[in-house]
Amino acid sequence: MDLSSFPITKKWPPSFPDRLQLYSFPTPNGVKASIFLEEVGLPYEAHRVDFGSQEQKSEEFLSLNPNGRIPAILDPNGPGGKPIALFESGAILLYLAEKTGQLLPREKYYEGLEWLMFQMAGIGPMFGQLGFFYKFAGREIEDKRPLDRYAAESRRLISVLNGHLRGRKYMLGDEFSLVDIAIFPWVRGLLSFYQAGDLVGFSDFPEVERVLESFLARPAVQRGLLIPE
């Protein structure tokens, strides 16, 4: 398979050009793709995009994702047997679900879309802003109203999850799905990376904690969380 027409392969040459190429870093958004791929067993090759040297802003990476964010993929076996390049983690999850026929049950397709959009529009941005104002540079801002706002909104979103998960094993019921893959790396990051569990009162949400533990116990999740190494 010849992928030389894609400039990103100049910076990250594929060792296995017949496999799906993943360009990522193990952040809550980045691991969505790797966890999905590990769960379904689709062959792929992972390339680490180094934030320290701003590789996500390199010309080669921007040729695949002009937004300069991970993850991005290049699938040599796209629709019609032609290569396809994709960015945005939600779009990648939907593409992989369509490609493999796994992790998004057809009878719950639109319910899955609802909760995927809930993560992308709510959980990701709110948890990310909370992390900025709680753990990173936002701490230097004397005005605490931004932190209070994002903490309150994050708590509200977790409360929505907690109510939905009562009586359910996972987000879409008994079946593990791409919705869980989208949401729970962010919940994990809120607790372990941002260390904001006490700030949002996470102990008040036992259903979310229960499903997070189940999510993290899955072997494919454990592998995916560490990819790229």
Image (tube, rainbow, N blue to C red):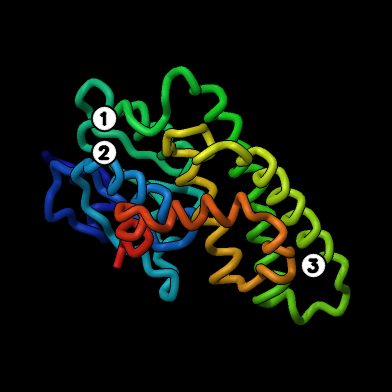
Q: CA distance from mark 1 to mark 3?
A: 43 Å
Which residue carries the number 2 mark? 75
Quadrant (top left, top right, bottom left, bottom right) of the N terminus: top left
Front-lying residue, 131 or 76: 131
What is the crowding at mark 3: few (fewer than 14 residues within 10 Å), some, or many (at least 20)? many
Q: CA distance from mark 2 to mark 3?
A: 40 Å
Query: Where is residue 199 drawn, in percent x and y?
Result: 74, 69
What is the crowding at mark 2: few (fewer than 14 residues within 10 Å), some, or many (at least 20)? many
Q: Nearer the viewer, mark 1 or mark 3?
A: 3
Query: Where is residue 97 drawn, in percent x and y?
Result: 37, 31
- Residue drawn at x 74%, y 56% is 155
The answer to whether mark 2 and mark 1 are in CB contact below 8 A is yes
Amino acid carrying mark 3 in the image: Leu
- Residue drawn at x 50%, y 45% is 182
Mark 2 residue element: strand
Mark 1 residue element: loop
Query: Where is residue 24 drawn, in percent x and y?
Result: 37, 57
Mark 3 residue element: helix
Which residue carries the number 1 mark? 78
Which residue carries the number 3 mark? 147
Left/right placement of residue 194 relative to residue 5 reads right
